[in-house]
Amino acid sequence: MFEGLSEKLEQSFKMLKGQGQITEVNVAETLKEVRKALLDADVSFKVAKNFTNEVKEKALGEKILTAVSPGQMMVKIIHNELSNLMGGEHEEINLSGNPSIILIAGLQGSGKTTFSAKLANHLKKKKSKKPLLVAGDVYRPAAIDQLKVLGEQIEVEVYSEEENKNPVKIADNAIKQAKQNGNNVVIIDTAGRLAVDEEMMKEISAIKKAVDPHESLFVVDSMTGQDAVNTAKAFNEQIDYDGVVLTKLDGDTRGGAALTIRRVVDKPIKFVGIGEKVDALDIFYPKRMADRILGMGDIVSLVEKAQEQFDEDEAKKLQKKIAKNQFNFDDFLKQIKQIKKMGNVKDLMGMVPGMGKAIKNMDIDDDAFKEIEAIIYSMTPEERENPKLLNGSRRHRIARGSGTNVQEVNRLLKQFKETSKMMKKMQGGGGKNLMKAMQNMGGINR
């Protein structure tokens, strides 16, 4: 995410290194490269030009600090302007109704149905809500089936009427059922098209008028760049939605949509999708995203993710075992499972300040722990409980059983010892322990 943009912005800042002061000449040279970086990231020319003009005005203004270097000052200014470009402050979703009605709109293939389930899961877990998902795509039976499968995964009820081809009536009936069943949130997944057309716009406008949602969200595929921005503009002109959801932000996206949409449609980005799993949804914070674009990491989001998986009772048990030097491979597995629940390993490491550049070219994926788990599961319960039993013959057996080799088994045992020592030094660190363990176990130094 944003790797190309981050790298090019970093290169542009180097032009100010060694400069004694910010001048109109060196600012112009730097901002020329910044503008090129934004254009390469698929930011519109108008937005890129306005952005660099605003940065130039700030950089040459009277409030420039003299206690820092020109390069540091430029990074600070661009960080602030990037944050402002993406909205400045995070805006919450409106859940004021009972039930709160949320309308989901967007083109076919943008990820509306998956996002609807992700949002239901998010509201259920984070807000203690009882959501009802509504299958409002009357043209694609597969969309109804997909929503039912996802609803079953997150244990959220899905309302559908397979024989009814009137999405307005379906939505209306779903709201009535929600009131009867005590659902305090209704999420309506609507039909999409391959392109914006008059029929589609009439239908989504009719649904919105009929249900009068407390929140309407436009879902857009961030990998489509400026096309995403143009579609967002067209939808906004028709239904005046309340917020934007960017999906597939973990894919091969240059970032132009995230940087441009707020400026073009004047609507906040509220969520970003970062994977296919039902829990792969992040709240959008402009300042945190600016941090990540400029290679500063996002430690706040990282700690929040760790805290979500932090079980206080389990942590106390673990601390006692660590204090008594009883940390074993079963505990090791539990730590791995906690880390995996937090999301994509490479994305998580990119949130650590200074780590983004270091891991940029490393192949770290969701299977980063696959070999480690295979080795541990090839141990007997007694071996996992007492790693000291692992002599040469046992290591050979474990290597054969896990499809690895003795060298990899030995490497894991070494990592295990190092992690055990580190965990003892850091007792009580909660989520910090988790992240340190991840750096040690995740195959990054392999």
Image (tube, grey):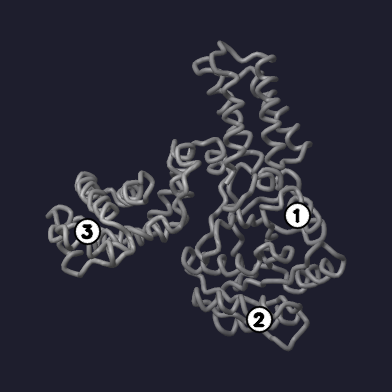
State left or right for residue 286 relative to residue 338: right
Q: Nearer the viewer, residue 431 or 207?
A: 431
Q: Which residue is mark 2?
A: 174
**First in residue order: circle 2 vs circle 1:** 2
Instruction: Tell me the kind of residue under disc 3.
Output: Leu
Badge 3, how many Cα within 10 Å: few under 14, some, many 20+?
A: some
Indicate which disc residue 318 carries.
3
Residue found farthest to the right = 198
**Residue 412 at x, y percent in the picture:** 27, 53
For the residues labelled 1 and 3, say whether their Cβ atoms are less than 8 Å apart. no
Q: CA distance from mark 2 to mark 1?
A: 27 Å
Name the residue that disc number 1 marks: 232
- Taking the spot 71% from the left edge, 33% from the top edge, the residue there is 51
Q: Secondary structure at mark 1?
A: helix
- How packed mark 2 is, by other alpha carbons closer than 10 Å (few <14, some 14-19, many 20 or more), is many
Q: Mark 2 and 1 residues: CB-CB less than 8 Å, in contact? A: no
Q: Is residue 231 left or right of residue 319?
A: right
